[in-house]
Amino acid sequence: MGRPLRVLIVEDSENDARLVVRRLEQSGFSPFWKRVDGAESLRAALSTHAWDIVLSDHSMPGFGSLQALSVLQEAGADVPFVVVSGAIREEDAVVVIRAGAADYIAKENFSRLIPVVERELRAAHLRREHQQLEGIQRENQARRNAILESALDSIVTIDHEGKVFEWNRAAEKTFGYRRADALGKVLADLIIPPKLRDRHKQGLARYLATGESSLLGRRMELMAMRADGTEFPVELTVTRVPVEGEPIFTSFIRDVTERRTLEEQLRQLQKMESIGQLAAGVAHDFNNILSVIQGHAYLVLGGMVQGKEAEESIKQIGAAAKRAAGLTRQLLTFSRKQQMQLQELNLNEVINATAKMVARLLGADIAMEFVPAQDLPGISGDVAMIEQILLNLVVNARDAMAKGGQLTISTSVCQLEGEAAKRNPEARPGVFVCLAVSDSGCGIAPEVLPRIFEPFFTTKSTGKGTGLGLATVYGIAKQHQGWIEVESEVGKGTTFIVFLPASSKPVTVAKEPGHTPAARGRRETILVAEDEPALRRLAGHILGNLGYEVLEAGTGMEAIQVWEQHAKKVDLLLTDLVMPDGLTGRELAKQMQTRDPSLKVVYTSGYSPETQETTFVFLEGTNFLQKPYPPSKLAEVVRRCLDGTKA
C-alpha cells in the first residue's frame, strides 16, 4: 500500500494528467486524484475535498496557472501549488512564483516532479505542525514536555563537561543518533566536525573559567556533522539554563540546508531584477569605447589622418578593443564564466607593466605615486585578473577625487599571526603579498561601507557605473585565496588593501614583446565554422594570407555539408562552441572526428568553455582560443594544433 496522497490536477489533457498520476504511483504514492480544467470545476473540487497538493498546467484554453492560483488563494486553502508545464517561459515562471506558486517543473525535466512534491509535502507538514505547536503553547503551558518531543528543531542539553543529557527526536532525525546512544556522550564528539572541536571545547572551558562566551544568546550558523560523517549547515542558539550549581546549556539546532538553497534562488532573482541597472552601466562603458573605435576609424577611412597620425589612430582602435575585451572579461569573471590562467608573478612587475594604462585613466589633475616593496615574494595568479583588480581600484579612486588629488599604489609583505589574523573574518595566519591603493578623495560614508562589495550596488548615478567594480575585485581576491580590507574616512580618503598568499615558487619571466613572424601554413585545408559573418571572413582572410586553404560555414549543419562536398579533405576544424542550429561546436567536432579520427580541432568562444565530458579538457593555446584573439595568436594556435605540440 503506497503513501496516501490527495492531488488536484489542473489540466485540460486527460492523458497528461494520467502521466502525472502514473509517475506518483511509481514513486510509492497511492494518489486520490481529480482533474479539473476551469475556474468553476476548481472551486467545486476545493469545496468538496481537502487536498495535499495542486499540480497545474501553465496554459490551457481560456484558463491558466495564474487564474488557477488566484482561485486557490480566494478559497483560503493552504495547499502547495506547483506548475507542471512544457510551454512555460522562465520569465512567466518567475511571475507565477512571485504570485505564490511553490515551484515550477518543465515537462522536459519531469524527473523533478517527485522531489518537488515530497519537498512541498514536507513543508506543508512542517507548517501544520508548527501551527499545532503554537496552539498547544497558547492553550496549556504545562504541556511543554510534549512540545519538546514534537519540536521541528533539534533541542540538545549538555552539562558543564559538555556531555549530553537531553536529546530530542528532531536531534535523532537530524544527526542520526538515537537518544539512548547520545546520552552521556560529549556533544562535540557527536555533531562537531573534527576541525572545529578544539574551538568548541576551548569556548566551553573559557566560559566555565571566566563566565564570558561569544555564543550565549546569539543565533549563528556553522557546520555540523551527522552520524555518517556528512557535514551540513545548521543554525544554532545556545542558552544557559537557570539552575543552581554547575551550569547547563540548551542548544536549539536547525538544519538550514534547504533554506540556504532557497536564499540562493532568491539572490538569483534579485540579480535578475538588477539587470537594468547593470545594462545601463555596461552600455555607458561600451559606448565610450565604441566612440573611440568609430571616431578613429572614420579618421583613417576618410583620409583625414595620414602617416604617423593614421598609425596612432589605428593604435587607439586596438587599445579601445583591448579595453572592451577587458570589460567583457570583468563581466565573465563576476559570473564565474572565466577560468583562471595561473602563473607565478611578481606584483611589482605587473603594476609597472600597467602603469601607462593607469596614467591614462587618471588624467592630469591626479598625481600618482608607486611605492614598491623591495625583495617582494611572488604570488600565484592570473595576470589579467590581477591587472583587473588594480584598474578597478584605480578607477574607483579616480571617481572619488572629482577635483583632483593624490593616488598612491604600494606593495608590501605581511606576515599574520595569532590575534592579527583575527581582525578580519576572512583573514588567516601566513605570509601575504599586499597591494594597497590609497586616494585623497571624498571617502566612504559609514552607512555605505558595509555594502560596497555587493554586486550591482553603486552610489554613482544611472549610467555612470555598473556596480561590478568592487564586487569583481572582491571575487578575484577570493579566487586567489585572498581577501580585501578597506579603511576610509569621509573627507580624508580611502585605502583598499588586497591580501594575496605569497608563493615560494620561482616567478615566471615575462617575455619581451617582439614582432615574431606569424607561423605560416603549408597548404593545409582549414574549415572555419563561425556564425558571425564578419568574424568568419576575418579568420578566413588571416588564415588565407598565411598560406592555408580555407573553407567557411555559418552553422554546424553547413559545416558538415561543406566538409562532405570537399571529400572530407580537411586538416583542421576551427569552430565556435556556440552555433545557431542546435549543433554545437563540440558536437560538430565529435561527428566529424568519428568519421575522420585524424582531424585536428581548435575551439573558440567568448567565454571559458564548459563540458559534461570527464575525459575531454579545453586547453587554452592548444585546442582552445579565447575571443577576442589577435591574428598572431590565431596563427600560433592553428600551427601548434596541426603540428601536435602543446602550449
Image (cartoon, rainbow, N blue to C red):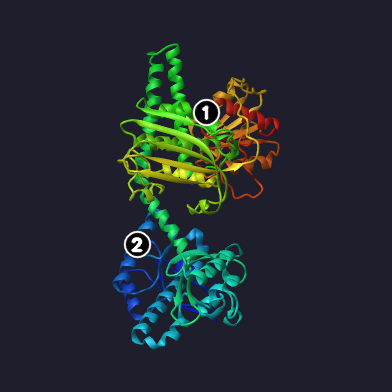
Distance between mark 2 and mark 1 Cα atoms? 65 Å
Image quadrant where one finds the N terminus:
bottom right
Image quadrant where one finds the C terminus:
top right
Task: Kindly state the secondary structure of the residue where label 1 is placed.
Answer: helix
When the figure is inspected, residue 149 is found, relative to residue 439, above or below; the finding is below
Most extreme residue toward the front is: 210
Q: Which residue is drawn at 41% across and 47% down?
A: 453
Few, some or many residues within 10 Å of mark 2 (<14, 14–19, 20+): few
Give the residue type at disc 1: Ala
| x and y, in percent, of residue 227 in the image | 61, 72
Left or right for 316, reference 520? left
- In which quarter of the view is residue 101 placed? bottom left
Residue nearer the viewer, 20 or 538: 538
When the figure is inspected, residue 23 is found, relative to residue 469, above or below; the finding is below
Q: Which mark is residue 50?
A: none
When the figure is inspected, residue 165 is found, relative to residue 511, above or below; the finding is below
Residue assigned mark 1: 353
Q: Are marks 2 and 1 in contact (CB under 8 Å)?
A: no
Q: Residue at x 64, y 32 (%)?
A: 572
Task: Kindly state the secondary structure of the residue where label 2 is placed.
Answer: loop
Q: Residue at x 36, y 74 (%)?
A: 78
- In which quarter of the view is residue 340 placed? top right
Residue assigned mark 2: 61
Can the viewer see residue 552? yes
| x and y, in percent, of residue 238 in the image | 46, 72
| x and y, in percent, of residue 612 in the image | 60, 50
| x and y, in percent, of residue 270 in the image | 38, 53
Circle nearer the N terminus (2, 1): 2
When the figure is inspected, residue 592 is found, relative to residue 129, above or below; the finding is above
Give the residue type at disc 2: Pro
